Image (cartoon, rainbow, N blue to C red):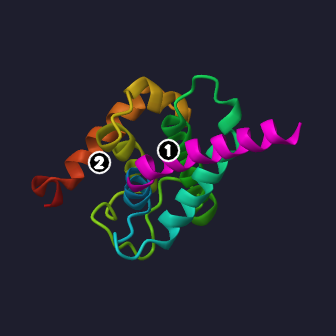
Amino acid sequence: MREPQASGEARRAREFEAFVAGAAGRLLHTATLLTAEAADDNPRARRLLTHALAHTYARWDRLRGEDPYDLARQYLATRFAREAWHRYGGLGRARPHPAGALAALTPRERLILVLRLYEGVAEEQAAALLGLPEERVRVICERAAHALTPAGFG
C-alpha cells in the first residue's frame, strides 16, 4: 500500500520540479519588477517567489485543470500587495529607498503595470484580482506607463 503512495509523491515532485524549472525565472523577474529591486540584489523578490512556489506546491494535487503559473502569479501579486500595505501603510506610497527601473512608481502602479504589460493579464482579470473597477485599473496603468516615458519625467 505504501508503494503506490510513494510513487505518487515521486511523480508529484517531478511534475513540480519541471514546473519550477520552466516558470521560476519568469516569476522571479516579475517579483523583481514588483519590488523595484535591482536584478542582482533582490532579496524581497526572492522571498516573494519562495512563498508563491510553496503555496503552489501545497495546492499541486488540487489544481484540477488550473494553470499552476497563473496560481503562482496570483499569489505573488496578492502577497506583494499585502506586504506593501503593511510595510508602507497602503499601495499608494512609494518605497523609501527604491533601486530598480520601476522604483519611481507606487507599489499599486507597479503591480498593475507589471500584471498588464509584462504578464499580459487582461484588464478585467487584474481588476478582479485587486478588487478594483476595470476603469481604475486602466487609468492607473496608463498613468504608470506615462510616468515611465521620457516625456512623463519632465
Q: Residues within 10 Å of mark 1 (few under 14, many from 20)?
A: some
Element assignment for label 1? helix
Q: Residues within 10 Å of mark 2 (few under 14, many from 20)?
A: many
Q: Which mark is residue 144?
A: 2
Q: Which residues are magenta?
A: 1-25
Q: Considering depth in this image, is 69 or 34 the residue closer to the camera?
A: 69
Q: Considering depth in this image, is 32 or 8 the residue closer to the camera?
A: 8
Q: Is residue 91 visible?
A: yes
**For the residue marked with disc 1, what is the amino acid?**
Phe
Q: Considering depth in this image, is 129 or 95 the residue closer to the camera?
A: 129
Place residue 48 in its image quadrant.
Answer: bottom right
Query: Is 3 displayed left or right of 113 in the figure?
Result: right
Mark 1 or 2: in front is 1
Point out residue 141 in the picture as x, y percentages from the top left corner.
32, 40
Q: Is residue 75 visible?
A: no
Point out residue 67 in the picture as x, y percentages from the top left corner.
52, 30
Query: Is 102 displayed left or right of 25 in the figure?
Result: left
Q: Main secondary structure of the magenta part?
A: helix
Query: Which residue, given by chain and number where applicable, does mark 1 sit on?
Result: 19
Place residue 2 in its image quadrant.
Answer: top right
User: Does residue 133 sit above or below 108 in this rendering?
Assistant: above
